[in-house]
Image (cartoon, rainbow, N blue to C red):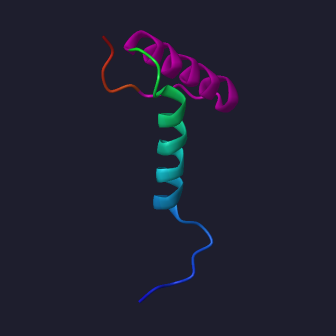
Amino acid sequence: MKTNKDFDCVKMMRDIRDKVNSEIVKMDSAQIIEYFRNKSSEFEKKYGQPVIQAHTP
């Protein structure tokens, strides 16, 4: 049974994943780490909450 949804979280997750992948596809590992550090900082500034990290090297 298919329902009509206003919001599809799986589609949103896939769209975000594809967007990030297209932005980092030609970066080396150091650039990718810096990319995610910058995105974390932007998130913290925008929402005022720290990003929870599972593992910090």
Residue most extreme to the bottom: 1
Image coordinates for residue 9, horizontal then vertical, percent = 50, 60
Q: Nearer the viewer, residue 50 or 32?
A: 32
Vertical comparison of 30 with 1: above or below: above
Quadrant assignment for the C terminus: top left
Q: Is residue 32 magenta?
A: yes
The quadrant in which residue 38 appears is: top right
Quadrant assignment for the N terminus: bottom left
Q: Nearer the viewer, residue 57 or 14?
A: 14
Q: Is residue 24 magenta?
A: no
Residue sitting at x 39%, y 25%: 53
Image coordinates for residue 23, horizontal then vertical, percent = 54, 30
Q: Which residues are magenta?
A: 29-52
Vertical comparison of 10 with 34: above or below: below
The quadrant in which residue 28 appears is: top left
Main SS of residues in magenta: helix
